[in-house]
Image (tube, rainbow, N blue to C red):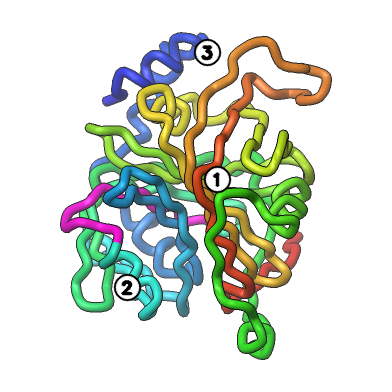
Amino acid sequence: MAHPGEIAVQTRAGFSDAARRMAVAVRREMPVAARDFIATLPLVIAAFRDDHAGMHVIAIEGKSGFARALSTREIAIDLCAKHTMRFRTCMLPNQPLGLLFLDGATRRRMRANGHATIAGDHLIVQVDEVYGNCPSYIQPRRWIERDAQQRINASPPTVARALSTAALHAITHTDTFFVGTCHAEAGADVSHRGGPPGFVNAIDERTLVWPDYGGNRFYQTLGNLHADPSCGLLFIDYARGDTWQLSGRANIVWDGYDRARYPDAERLVRFELDTMTESPAALTLCAIDSV
């Protein structure tokens, strides 16, 4: 059932009736096709809130099968030492977690939201809701192994309160990023955002704006932001494996923007940065165009 933030956005956007009709697509249990799909992927996107109320979005990678369904309502994800430590540091038992499973080669994506617990070096997620999304704005890519030497020579991660030159260049040239939000009752959620290269605009070193295009009309992300502005973003350099994890606050811009600059946008989202973690060569994978 939609929470008040989602209902408010659906109503403002004029899609409350359509959202109610499409709500049947949200399931409490994973069908066989969804369980099989999870096991094929080498990378999963996760979003969660830390104990200081900051939202984080991270990429978790592994060999196909590292993420798998244990039952119709339970997912296990194998973690490396780095991610195990991070989850142990940031998460409480049974904490809300949003997961995004995306296959760029087939342009298929699925979201699963629930509550997570660390068990050894595994992340165990009890699924509360699962649903597929349309392939709109998904760039056709496939993951391959990257040259290991690039990771060996990489600089360690750095934390800053402003976007670096490298981050600004990557963000303002990207065609894809990921956004994590949370709602007090509905829990955490993570979604994909895509558009033409350069669709994210940097107002300054701490402020980003991006167009919000038509989607599934559930408005989970915007509904969460309507109720709680806490927001996490993840940007990836698909050639080098660099990542930029941003934590801050976001608000919806409904009116008063330059519509010529943002063609096809139904509204904008404005993000204000609190902290950025820049991680060179963080991923063992890189992505190449897949047609």
Residue picked out by circle 2: 85
List x then y, in percent, for residue 149: 67, 90
Which residue is pictured at 66% across the width and 33% down the height? 210
The image quarter containing residue 71 is bottom left
Please name the amino acid that badge 3 sits on: Ala
**Residue 122 disc label:** none
Which comes sooner in the sequence, label 2 or label 1? 2
Q: Secondary structure at mark 3?
A: helix
Which residue is pictured at 73% across the width and 59% down the height? 166
Disc 3 to disc 2, C-alpha distance: 41 Å
Residue picked out by circle 3: 13
Q: Tell me if residue 206 comes above or below residue 95 in the rendering.
A: above
Disc 2 to disc 1, C-alpha distance: 25 Å
**Residue 192 disc label:** 1
Which comes sooner in the sequence, label 3 or label 2? 3
Judged from this view, the residue extending furthest toward the right is 260
Residue 95 part of the magenta segment = yes
The image quarter containing residue 225 is top left
Quadrant showing the C terminus: bottom right
Please name the amino acid that badge 2 sits on: Met
Quadrant showing the N terminus: top left
Mark 1 Cα-neighbour bin, 10 Å: few <14, some 14–19, many ≥20: many
Q: Secondary structure at mark 1?
A: strand
Residue 244 can be seen, yes or no: yes
Magenta segment, prevailing SS (helix, strand or loop): strand
Mark 2 Cα-neighbour bin, 10 Å: few <14, some 14–19, many ≥20: few
Magenta part of the chain: 90-102
